[in-house]
Amino acid sequence: MRRLALGALAVSALLVAVAPASGASSISWFKTPSKNIYCAWFHEAGSRQSLRCDVGRLTHPAPKPHGCQFDWGRSFGMDATGRASALCVSDSVHDKRAKTLAYGKTRKYGSFTCASKTSGLRCSNRSGHGFSLNRDRYKLF
């Protein structure tokens, strides 16, 4: 009986530990039809948001960020306001389940607007800053 009670207590503790808290953050993934660019929109119940896009193949990668000890050159990100930047990352936002943002379509992801064209992906935040990405180059603005 004691062993059963301890087991139930352990399971309860585990469920509490992995249950999402109110105001928890969530992630929405999307990709371009070429499957060369994958993005993740990170949004919290409050107002904090960020957008990150990874380019699978990029002819001219971004320079290595100062002090970067991980992967660099093909990941770009921004917050809801402020400038976009090249990122130093140790993971990927590539997700097979990502929804496709079709060519010719523009979609809002919270504070971000992304437009998919055959020439690449362009995303901007509410400050008007962002990035343009394609197989050949990136541009931060």
Image (cartoon, rainbow, N blue to C red):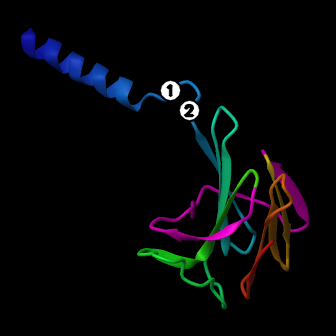
Residue located 58% across and 61% down the image: 96
The span shown in magenta is 82-110
Q: How many marks?
A: 2
Q: Nearer the viewer, residue 68 or 19?
A: 68
User: Residue 87 in the image: x percent, y percent?
Assistant: 58, 70
Given residues 23 and 47, the one toward you in this image is 47
Residue at the farthest top position: 1
- The image quarter containing residue 65 is bottom right
C-beta proximity under 8 Å, tags 2 and 1: yes
Please report the residue visible at 9 percent of the width from the left and 8 percent of the height from the top: 1
Q: Quadrant of the C terminus?
A: bottom right
Q: Residue at x 74, y 68 (%)?
A: 32
112 above or below 61? above
Question: The residue tagged with tag 1: helix, strand or loop?
Answer: loop
67 is higher (above) or lower (below) than 102: below
Q: CA distance from mark 2 to mark 1?
A: 5 Å
Above or below, 27 relative to 19: below
Badge 1 crowding class, 10 Å Cα cut-off, few under 14, some 14 to 19, many 20 or more, is few
Crowding at label 2, few (<14), some or many (≥20) Cα neighbours within 10 Å? few
Residue linked to disc 1: 21
Under circle 2, the secondary element is loop
Horizontal side, residue 140 vs residue 44: left or right: right
Reading the image, the residue beneath label 2 is: 24
Q: Does 79 appear in magenta? A: no
Quick one: which residue is furthest to the left in this view? 2
For residue 140, above or below residue 47: below
Q: Position of residue 11 (x, y in %)?
A: 27, 23
